[in-house]
Image (cartoon, rainbow, N blue to C red):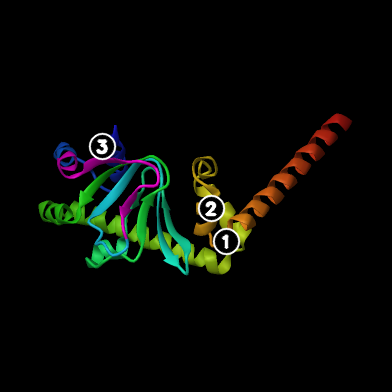
Amino acid sequence: MMYDMLIQQLSQYVTVTDEDRNTIKRYFQPINFDKYATITKVGEVEEYQYFITSGYARTFYQLNGIELTTQIGWQRQFIFSVQSFVNRKPSLETLETISKFSALRIHFEDLQRLYKLNDKWLHLSLHVMESALINQNDRIKRLSLFSAKERYESLVSENPALLQDIALRYLASYIGIKPESLSRIRSNMNNRATIHKKGKASLAIRA
């Protein structure tokens, strides 16, 4: 099941043959972590890319005692410390789980071996890297150009299950606001939704 999920994802970009399926099973290792497990610490070199099959993980920095979340990853996404993995230098951020977490991971050296097997693996790796960079760039744009409410709505539209599955403080950190500010935004949105529903119900009764 875990491998099927990865194969389906990769099939969006290249044709996956039976030989490729066997290669995936040989080089991608299943791994599970408990909630709040640290996968990569600050100062460690990122050795793996993780394809998430269930659960959530995040990367974050510490700045003056405050955690700044830079990525939140969920099912069918890759997550890893991108700069550390690519540059082979110590990570400046922590990668940790924020729920029970399962993934298929591939080691940096194994990825280099795949590049030598077939050009399609290089193509797929470039796509993973491009997606990571695009996501980071989009986040920077949202932080610069969107209001707090718009940033929250944009994130939730990507994955509505986030509201039920992970702690509010991580969502707040990711969109660059304090948890109490996000609570006010959600409360105001819920109040407006309630008023709207009551208004529609009143019109229906009159009709």
The secondary element bearing badge 2 is classed as: helix
* Mark 3 Cα shell of 10 Å, populated few (<14), some (14-19), many (≥20): some
User: 184 and 116: which one is in front?
Assistant: 184
Q: Nearest the camera: 39 or 55?
A: 39
> Residue at point 41% right, 64% down?
61
**Cα separation between marks 2 and 3:** 32 Å
Do the residues bearing badges 1 and 2 touch, measured as CB atoms within 8 Å? no
Residue receiving disc 1? 177
Measure how far apart labels 1 and 3 are at the Cα level.
Answer: 37 Å
Question: Compared with residue 47, is residue 65 higher up or lower down, i.e. above or below?
Answer: below
Residue 186: mark in rendering: none
Residue 204 vertical placement versus 131 (above, below): above
**Label 1 environment density (alpha carbons within 10 Å; few <14, some 14–19, many ≥20):** some
Quarter of the image for the C terminus: give it.
top right
Q: Residues within 10 Å of mark 2 (few under 14, many from 20)?
A: some
Q: Give amino acid for label 2.
A: Arg
Please state, as top left, top right, bottom left or bottom right, where the N terminus lies in the image: top left
Residue at image mark 3? 3
Mark 1 and mark 2 lie on one chain; the one further toward the N terminus is: 2
Q: Quadrant of residue 26?
A: top left
Say which of 198 and 185 sits in front. 185
The residue to which callout 2 is attached is 169
* Side (left or right) of 166 relative to 20: right
The reply to whether dot 2 and dot 3 touch (C-beta < 8 Å) is no
Residue 150 magenta-highlighted? no
Separation (CA) of disc 1 from disc 2: 9 Å
Q: Earlier in the sequence, mark 2 or mark 3?
A: 3
Q: Amino acid at mark 3?
A: Tyr
Q: Secondary structure at mark 1?
A: loop
